[in-house]
Image (spheres, rainbow, N blue to C red):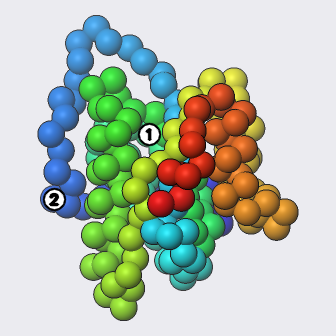
Amino acid sequence: MGARIEENKPANAGDINLRVQRAMPRTFTNLLTHCIFSTKGREALIDPSMRVELHAYLGGIVREIGGTALGVNSMPDHVHMLFSLPPAVALSEAMRLIKANSSKWVHERWPERPTFAWQLGFGAFSVSKSSVPQVLKYIENQKEHHRKTTFQEEFLNFLRRHEVEFDERYIWN
């Protein structure tokens, strides 16, 4: 279940605190980002019964801030998203909105999950337009991929492959 987002369920616009400019005249972009973020402590907090609604809600938040979610999928302990954002929305602000609003929504939708939370931080990797089909396939095939690889191994591989400098002592806290 997951990946390609054909029609996102609208996020509740009242929940999203937008302080971003909607348009920048004469500015044209197509910046695609593959974001990966985990649950707090990498605990298995994303239950199969909530996955479909959570994916739609995450995509809806992206749409509410003027972006386009191309793919969303998750494992019990982390999420992969491929999206584009408008030029006036900083990636860090988008991720703050995505994580804060979806966490609040999970608590309201499933009050029996009071410990649900996202880990601080995220990984974000630029994607070329020509690589979108491969990235979407990767996002779709998370279940098969994680039969062989842990989330921690996957994330470290992404950092290395994209030549992101890091100190492993600070990744998992």
Position above or below: 79 against 161: below
Residue shown at the point (18%, 29%) measured from the top left: 21
Amino acid at the residue labelled 2: Gly
Residue shown at the point (50%, 70%) measured from the top left: 41
Q: In the rendering, which numbered label is found on residue 142?
A: none
Residue matched to label 2:
14
Secondary structure, mark 1, is strand
Q: What is the spatial separation of the Cα atoms under label 1 and label 2, in whole angstroms? A: 19 Å
**Quarter of the image with the N terminus in it:** bottom right
Residue shown at the point (73%, 63%) measured from the top left: 150
Secondary structure, mark 2, is helix
In the image, 152 versus 52, the foreground residue is: 152
Residue furthest to the right: 148
Left or right of 142? Residue 24 is left
Q: Would residue 55 be seen by someone viewing this image from the given angle?
A: no
Labelled pair 1, 2 in contact (Cβ < 8 Å): no
Position in image of residue 135 (x %, y %): 69, 40
